[in-house]
Amino acid sequence: MTAHTDTPGSVTTVYKVTGMSCGHCEGAITGEVSQIPGVTSVKAVASTGEVTVVSAAPLDDEAVRAAVDEAGFELAGKA
């Protein structure tokens, strides 16, 4: 499980997501995860299946799972 602090007060977490295959997929996930309260940055990479999320505080995994599900993908866990 990867979670570390980049800047004071921020937490970076890398998640594994299955089903991403293109830029549209990346955009769908980025859009949904960005709506979670406290999220300041999201970067989804289809080629690796990784979604890097920067937030003000650690996120509830179920909130991230719900956002990924809403985008049409499956959260496999943390990288």
Image (cartoon, rainbow, N blue to C red):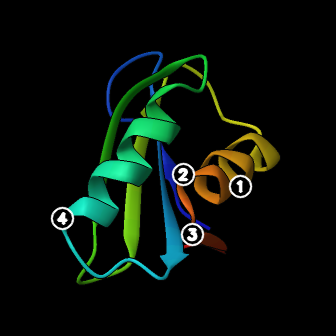
**62 lies left or right of 37:** right
Measured Cα–Cα span from mark 3 to mark 2: 22 Å
Tag 2, which secondary structure? Answer: strand
Quickly name the residue at label 3: 73
First-in-chain label (3 vs 4): 4
Residue ID at (55%, 17%) = 38
Q: Is residue 76 above or below residue 35?
A: below
Looking at the rendered structure, the kind of residue marked 2 is Ala
**22 lies left or right of 18:** left
Tag 4, which secondary structure? Answer: helix
Quarter of the rendering containing residue 76: bottom right
Quarter of the rendering containing residue 10: top left
Residue ID at (27%, 75%) = 46
First-in-chain label (1 vs 3): 1
Quickly name the residue at label 2: 3
Looking at the rendered structure, the kind of residue marked 3 is Phe
Measured Cα–Cα span from mark 4 to mark 2: 25 Å
Looking at the rendered structure, the kind of residue marked 4 is Gly
